[in-house]
Image (cartoon, rainbow, N blue to C red):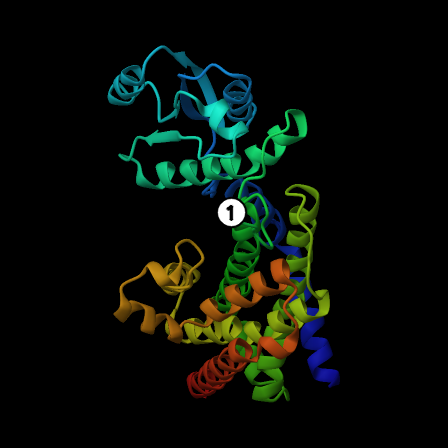
Amino acid sequence: MQRILYLLQKEFRQVFRDRMMVAIMFVAPVIQMLLLGSVMTTDVKNVKLLIYDADKSFASRELGRKFMNNPYFDFIGYTESAAAIHEALDKWQAQIGLLIKPHFGRDLERGLRPEVQLVADGLDGNTAGIALGYAQGILTSFAPDVAAIQPVKALLVNETRLWYNLNLESKHYMVPGLIGLLATIVTMFLTSMGLVREKEIGTLEQLMVTPIRRAELIIGKILPFVIIGFVEINVMFGVAFLVFKLKLAGSYFLFLGVSLVYFMTALGLGIFISTLAETQQQAMFISWFFMIFLMLMSGFLTPVANMPEAWQKVTYLNPLRYYVNLLREIFLKATPLEFLWNEILPLAVFGLLIFVASAMKFHKRVN
């Protein structure tokens, strides 16, 4: 135990003596979190909107105001005909058009089925689909709002209620995934580069001739990066809370516990990479090779369900897939531990296998 503590002191001194390494550990993740958390969004805003009001009643004007005051739409103006909306869509002057049919207000008051039509530019299918979803939400909430001002007969309203992300803001989905991604980068990269640096400067051979055992050497080398990984997670929590105004719905300690299980994978990969690379540059390139596959096959950017069926099965071999799912479940849904075992168990098995295999390869390489 004493030898491990001495090795820990050495590792921390070595890490914090290098100012560039400190910047990489603590400044770079914060910048990445701020930048990627803001840029990587699936929200659709400022959708150019045209309205044709053929009814010109109180109810139709109120419906127009609901769309105009919505932050997701950029109201361009009213047109005098339905054909003008189609022409504006053809010329890319508008992205969505709202056509309020004649007798809209009368039909609404009589409890009939007032008609409106939404026309969207489907060239950008993603934007069109999301904008139509926003419009549907406005229409759904419209009748009760008008009834509060002007009595109308009761209407059957199909109300859709979203849980966990009421406004469908992508930051709620992206930021927990970013925490997992950046934690992977920091722990895996630092472990691989730290071990390779020891080989480069020859201090690994010096450690070999000391009384320290192989297991103590590995523990002493990876434990600082586990601690740094937890510090990183808390720094990113601070950014998520203060900058992105998110709240952790689930258990903080469950979040850390799941992260500890995942660190076995990240650190194991770092050790494995260190046995392949002879220089820090090689370690960085090999780490990025693994990182690209881990990231793209994890569901962090695109849902796994959108991938081809064969590749969906391959993602079950990716530990980051389980970690990102767990972080989102805990962060957004406050899912208790009893419902997370189907994700935690494979994550633990993968972590144990990768860590043990990497440690054995490291032993063999050192011997």
Q: Residue 54: x and y, percent?
A: 40, 16
Query: Dot 1 corresponds to which residue?
Result: 158
Is residue 69 toward the left or the right of residue 255 in the image?
Answer: left
Q: Quadrant of the N terminus?
A: bottom right
Which residue is situated farthest in the front direction here? 110
Identify the amino acid type marked 1: Asn
Q: Quadrant of the C terminus?
A: bottom left
Q: Report which quarter residue 59 is drawn in.
A: top right
User: Residue at the spot x=61%, y=67% of the render?
Assistant: 225
State the residue in front, 74 or 23.
74
Is residue 197 toward the left or the right of residue 220 in the image?
Answer: left
Q: Is residue 37 above or below residue 288?
A: above
Mark 1, secondary structure of its residue: loop
Which residue is situated farthest in the top direction here? 80
Q: Is residue 41 above or below residue 24?
A: above
Q: Is residue 56 above or below residue 261?
A: above
Q: Residue 240: x and y, percent?
A: 65, 48
Q: Residue 343: x and y, percent?
A: 52, 76
User: Residue at the spot x=31%, y=40% of the render?
Assistant: 125
State the residue in front, 278 or 284.
284
State the residue in front, 87 or 314.
87
Label 1 environment density (alpha carbons within 10 Å; few <14, some 14–19, many ≥20): few
Is residue 209 toward the left or the right of residue 102 in the image?
Answer: right
Would residue 285 be seen by someone viewing this image from the given angle? no
